[in-house]
Image: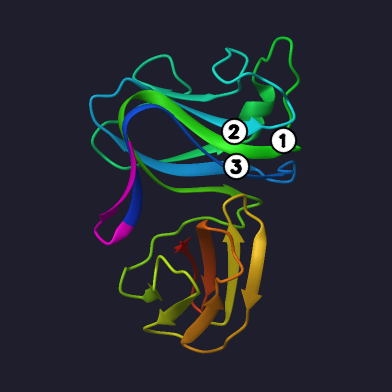
C-alpha cells in the first residue's frame, strides 16, 4: 500500500509491505546528468534495490540484467542502515557500468525509477542532479516558508530574513521549468501548468542558496 504521510510537517512517501514500487514520467535524456539522490528510513530490512529505468533498453523488469543499486546489510553497493534517515547519492555512471548481458543500457530515454525490497519503506527527496545544480543543503526550518504545499494553482515562497534574489524551479529529472529574479522577501510561483508531482525550488539570497521541495497536486 502506498501513502503520503507528514513527518514533522514534511510530506514523505510510505510504501507498506514493499515488493516493488516505481514512478514514471515522459522519457528524458539524462546523459548530461551526474547523480540521483534520495533519503530512506527502514526497520527490520535486509535490502533495498534502486533502479533507473530506460524505456528504450527493453530490459524486462525483474531481470538480473536490470541495472540496480543495492543497499543491503551485507554484500551491497552500500550498507543498509536501520531506524534513521539516510541520504543516498548514486553516480549515474554506476548504472552505465552495470553488467547487462544481452542488453545495452543507456540514459537516453529514462522514464522511471523503481524500488524493490522486503518490508515497509519510507523515502523522500528523490531527484537527479547535474554538476551540483540541485543539491539539498541544511537550512533552519524557520528561514523560509512555502505555502500552500502541496499546491494546485500556485506556491508562495516567503523569506523571514534576507530578500530572495533568484528562484529556479526544477522537476524530478532535474530540468528547469521556471526562473524568477524577485529581489523581494516573497515570490509567487504559478503551478497551474505543471504536471502533478515533486519539484524543487532553488532559492538564492545574498547569503546562501538552498532548495525547497514543492508538491504539485
The residue beneath circle 3 is: 35
The residue carrying pointer 1 sits among few (fewer than 14), some (14 to 19) or many (20 or more) residues within 10 Å by Cα, namely many
Q: Is residue 57 above or below residue 10?
A: above
Residue at horizontal 60 percent and vertical 23 percent from the top: 67
Q: In the image, what residue occupies the spot 29% across and 24% down?
A: 45
On screen, residue 145 versus residue 167, left or right, reads left
| Residue pictured at 62% horizontal, 28% vertical | 94
Residue 165 vertical position relative to residue 42 in the rendered view, above or below: below
Q: Position of residue 191 (x, y in %)?
A: 55, 71
Mark 2 or mark 1: whose residue is earlier in sequence: 2
Q: Position of residue 96 (x, y in %)?
A: 69, 27
Marks 2 & 1, CB-CB < 8 Å contact: yes
Give the CA distance from mark 2 to mark 1: 9 Å
Q: Which residue is mark 2?
A: 52
For the residues marked 2 and 3, what is the alpha-carbon distance in whole angstroms?
11 Å
- Nearest the camera: 181 or 188? 188
Is 31 placed left or right of 76 in the picture?
right
Amino acid at each position: 500500500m502506498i501513502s503520503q504521510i507528514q513527518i514533522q510537517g514534511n510530506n514523505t512517501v510510505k510504501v507498506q509491505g514493499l515488493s516493488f514500487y516505481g514512478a514514471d514520467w515522459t522519457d528524458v535524456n539524462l546523459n548530461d546528468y551526474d547523480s540521483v539522490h534520495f533519503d530512506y528510513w527502514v526497520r527490520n530490512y535486509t535490502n533495498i534495490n534502486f533502479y533507473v529505468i530506460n524505456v528504450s533498453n527493453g530490459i524486462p523488469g525483474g531481470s538480473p540484467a536490470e541495472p540496480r543499486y543495492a543497499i543491503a546489510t551485507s554484500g551491497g553497493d552500500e550498507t543498509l542502515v536501520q531506524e534513521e534517515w539516510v541520504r543516498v547519492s548514486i553516480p549515474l555512471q554506476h548504472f552505465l557500468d552495470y553488467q547487462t548481458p544481452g542488453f545495452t543500457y543507456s540514459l537516453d530515454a529514462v522514464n522511471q525509477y523503481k524500488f524493490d525490497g522486503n518490508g515497509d519503506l519510507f523515502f523522500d527527496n528523490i531527484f537527479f542532479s547535474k554538476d551540483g545544480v540541485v543539491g539539498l543543503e541544511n537550512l533552519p526550518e524557520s528561514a523560509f516558508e512555502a505555502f500552500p504545499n502541496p499546491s494546485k494553482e500556485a506556491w508562495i515562497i516567503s523569506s523571514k530574513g534576507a530578500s530572495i534574489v533568484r528562484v529556479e524551479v526544477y522537476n524530478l529529472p532535474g530540468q528547469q521549468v521556471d526562473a524568477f529574479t524577485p529581489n523581494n522577501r516573497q515570490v509567487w510561483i504559478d503551478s497551474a501548468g505543471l504536471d502533478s508531482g515533486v519539484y524543487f525550488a532553488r532559492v538564492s539570497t545574498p547569503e546562501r542558496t538552498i532548495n525547497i521541495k514543492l508538491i504539485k497536486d
